[in-house]
Image: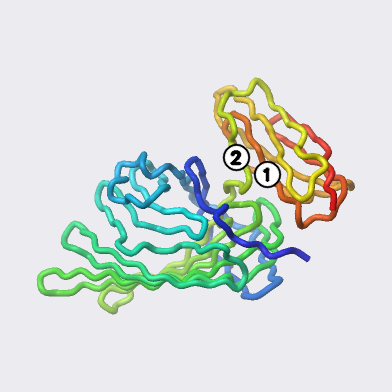
Amino acid sequence: MYSQITLTSANNPVPGNTSKTVTCDTTGITEGNSGANQNWNYSGLVRRDSTVNTWVSSNTTPYAAQFPTSDVASTSDNAEYSYFTTSSSSLIYNGYGGAFQINSYSDAETILQYPFTFNSNFSDTYSSVYNNGIANSYLNGTITSTGDAWGTLVLPNGTFNNALRVKNVTVQRDSTYIGGFNNIVDFTSTSYAWFVPDRKFPVFEIRYNSGTINGTQTFSLKLVTYNPDNPTIGISQINTNIADEYVLSQNYPNPFNPSTKIRFDIAAGDRNTSSMVKLTVYDQLGKEVTTLVNENLSPGSYEYNWNAGTLAGGIYYYTLSSGNFTDTKKMILIK
């Protein structure tokens, strides 16, 4: 039995976050059923191309002036940016900016509302007026989000219990009046995004897109994406000074109930670049309980704030591994 995952503002992006999105073969991949206690096995994904998305402070981007309410932006090429506003209650999309087009929403789009869990739902409308290079375009859309399923998700990088699936349905119309003729582009998208405990962003997504121009269908496609490198919730970099060596500190407090902090230092490699780091918790029998960190981290000092509220009291062990370094320490959870 697993407690249901709840999305909160901890899922919001912050400057410095990165995520790797891998496009996969769509053959034989379906979203499965809705409801509780589902099982989804996508362990055999055939991976294709990949992109790395980086989150930055919006005020450091070239188009910040057009998005004054945004606090973060994302980019995969340092040329085009998507702009967002984060808060304790929501994640809001404000539009995009690039060398060839800027679209700042007059009525922003709510991407997530918090808290959000199984059977949660919300709807939002959004709109903008922007120049498409020929004339002004009028964009209007509606998004409806539902926590429609939860269960066990199997991916190439592991099994995730208590995964939450969020279904998003977007209906959008883009109208442009040119030379006495109104050109109407309709776009619809239904997506299924899986969130798992302790990871900020969806780890897997299936999306169905279709579009028409003046009533004639112009495209219909299916997209499957996999996000193996996903920021960890609860970890923060507390010092960017380059460590001389790897260090795993004793958790504090210890004993604890239900939260404790685990600090560790990541040393610089030969090229002073990021290293693959894994922080894993085991029970007394050596069975893996959870993986707290499994991502590339730059050199420095880190702290992970772990809440073990769903676990039984007892002795647990946590192991830090990176390259040739491995260290393990004991901690005691009191209930």
Residue drawn where x is 49% and y is 66% of the image:
207
The quadrant in which residue 137 appears is bottom left
For label 1, the crowd category at 10 Å Cα-Cα, with few meaning under 14, some 14 to 19 and many 20 or more, is some
At label 1, the amino acid type is: Asn
Note whether 113 is above or below 35 in the view shown. Answer: above
Residue drawn where x is 70% and y is 64% of the image:
152
Say whether residue 50 is left or right of residue 279: left
Secondary structure of the residue carrying tag 1 is: strand
How many circles with numbers are drawn on the protein?
A: 2
The quadrant in which residue 123 appears is bottom left
Q: Which residue is mark 1?
A: 305
Say whether residue 180 is left or right of residue 2: left
Measured as percent of width and height from the top left, residue 8 is found at 57, 58
Note whether 57 is above or below 30 in the view shown. Answer: above
Secondary structure of the residue carrying tag 2 is: strand
The earlier-in-sequence mark between 1 and 2 is 2
The quadrant in which residue 172 appears is bottom left
Residue drawn where x is 68% and y is 44% of the image:
305
Residue drawn where x is 69% and y is 35% of the image:
263
Q: Which residue is mark 2?
A: 236
Q: Compare residues 66 and 267 and report the one nearer the observer.
A: 66
Asked if the residue under mark 2 is in contact with the one under mark 1, i.e. CB atoms within 8 Å, the reply is yes
Measured as percent of width and height from the top left, residue 78 is found at 37, 41
Colouring scheme, one of rainbow, by chain, secondary structure, one colour = rainbow
Q: Compare residues 286 and 21 and report the one nearer the observer.
A: 286
Q: Quadrant of the N terminus?
A: bottom right
For label 2, the crowd category at 10 Å Cα-Cα, with few meaning under 14, some 14 to 19 and many 20 or more, is few
Say whether residue 60 is left or right of residue 297: left
